Amino acid sequence: MKASDLFVECLEEEGIEYIFGVPGEENADFMMSLEKSGQIKFILTRHEQGAAFMAEIYGRLTGQPAGCLGTLGPGATNLITGVADSNMDRAPMLVLTGQGASTRLHKESHQVMDVVAMFKPVTKWATTVLHPENIPEIIRKAVRLARTEKPGAVHIELPEDIAKLPVAGEPLSVQKFRRPVPADKIIDQAVEAISQAKRPVIIAGNGCIRKRASKQLRKLCEQTGIGVISTFMAKGAVDMDADYCLYTIGLGAKDYVACAVDSADLVITLGYDMVEYHPKLWNDGKNKKVLHIDFLPAEIDENYHPEVEVVGDLAHALWMINERVAENPDRFSFDLAQQHAVRRDMWEEISAHKDEQLVGTITPQKVLWDAREVMGAEDILLSDVGAHKMWIARQYQCHEPNTCLIPNGFCSMGFSLPGAIAASMVHPDKKILSISGDAGFLMNVQEMETAKRLGSKFVAMVWEDNAYGLIAWKQENEFGKHTELSFGNPNWLELASAFGWNGHYVKGGAELKTVLVQAFSEQGPSLVVVPIDYRENMKLSERLGEISCPI
């Protein structure tokens, strides 16, 4: 067989289901080999960035890597934003690129650049295939690294001349391993720290959305009553209806949820990545006692210096703590008054606009209340990046892990439309709702054709304000004014029709829920455009600036 055939066989052995991408001349042999696969399906996209976002969402929802593919040069550079997003948001991914013949890589040559060097800063590992005999080892290592906590992106480059070479080899079998678990002694220290606290609080991060970790976290809270504040990516780690759910933190400005952290004498961080919400924002005085529980040791930071670090499998660590709590529950008695007040005040915020019936622009709060009413507990919302993301993080709460997908490490616009295509492939039985600003939606608008071609079934909602709303909001907060950030938009209904989509333009709050229900009942993808009232942005900033923390 030739090297590209062996490459595909190794991917099959790893259980790879999908590769998303745009092929080129330099990976033609790979594509011919892939076409013969009875297991791996290639999804042709309209831009490599869209392919990377699709692979990212597949990884976030399944815990297994998919591939995203581009050729050398511009194909590879087009992939990199989505790859960086996946890596920083801890989603497993295989990045596959072609390359010119190895005989011309040492000199100036058409479209040739050092792709491996480019991907090294945004992946867990990046390498090139120099000898076809190494392919089984490279694939096995790449997939293992992509899956290993904390998961992320891995890049493999296959030069065009290497892909053609004959090779006698076979895939390495997949050998899985159990993650290391914490020692009993450190768990005892963690339990002791919790038992001595009077007002503990939990900050749940990205690591908590793993099913086993979420299950053990909920059990801990049911036994102790300790409240859980979720980062943007940890939404659904605990059920929004649970008394111990304190909703979401991460706006940057002080919100009601921060009152629970302010009053805490112990902050327990679980699966926490500081790229989401830096500890300077909640421990500026460097006086908080911190218990760090995660797959990896704590990042070194002057505002994050844990007294106790529990390092190992997160779910198993929580199970060990739960076993000790169950043995002597009377040790764990806490003052929960502040967290009850936080939950009360935040629920008033979340529900304040639910009965709004205005005609014309609609407030973000009303849109998200109605979206939550229409979406089931297991349905999936994907947020793009923009002002709407901040509102989704604050107002849209979840029952289950991985039912609200927000890019919050690398924070790339253009994420949600291609992501919704992948989500509808993974879960065709669920309602899938992507929410974008008008700026973010048009960044990957070409993937509307991909969605139509694949027969994807989801609703893409666009919040229309004809501007870069989040930048305007931040500039207004800092400078009292903003620069010129306005732009024009297409006729949305004509755009939907041109791509063969269903299309709806919402005229007011009274019809929003009806339109959403109709859109979800339609065959194929549907576009729902909402004229959004972003005057609420500065109203929220003013309100948050006046927050005090009474019980």
Image (cartoon, grey):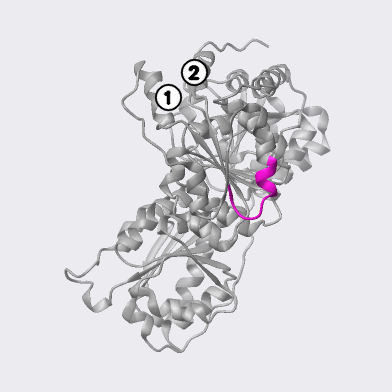
Q: Do the residues labelled 2 and 1 touch (CB within 8 Å)?
A: yes
Residue at (39%, 26%) from the top-left corner? 472
- Judging depth in this view, the residue of 113 and 460 nearest the camera is 460
Q: In this view, does 401 lie above or below 191?
A: below
- Residue 36 in picture, x, y percent from top left: 53, 82
- Judging depth in this view, the residue of 55 and 225 nearest the camera is 55
Q: In this view, does 327 lie above or below 105?
A: above
SS type, badge 2: helix
Q: What residue type is labelled 2?
A: Ser
SS type, badge 1: helix
Q: Is residue 18 above or below residue 257?
A: below
Residue at (69%, 32%) from the top-left corner? 192
Counting residues from the N terminus, which is met first, the one under dot 2 or under dot 1? 1
The magenta stretch is: 517-526
What residue sits right under mark 2 in the picture? 541
Q: What residue type is labelled 1?
A: Trp
Residue at (74%, 34%) from the top-left corner? 221
* Numbered mark located on residue 249 in the image: none
- Judging depth in this view, the residue of 200 and 100 nearest the camera is 100
- Residue 183 in picture, x, y percent from top left: 65, 48
Direction from residue 215 to residue 312 in the image, left or right? left
- Judging depth in this view, the residue of 289 and 115 nearest the camera is 115
- Residue 372 in picture, x, y percent from top left: 68, 35
The answer to whether residue 179 is visible is: no
What residue sits right under mark 1 in the picture? 473
The answer to whether residue 85 is visible is: yes
Residue 406 falls within the magenta-colored stretch: no
Residue at (57%, 26%) from the top-left corner? 362
What is the spatial separation of the Cα atoms under label 2 and label 1, in whole angstroms? 9 Å
- Residue 512 in picture, x, y percent from top left: 64, 33
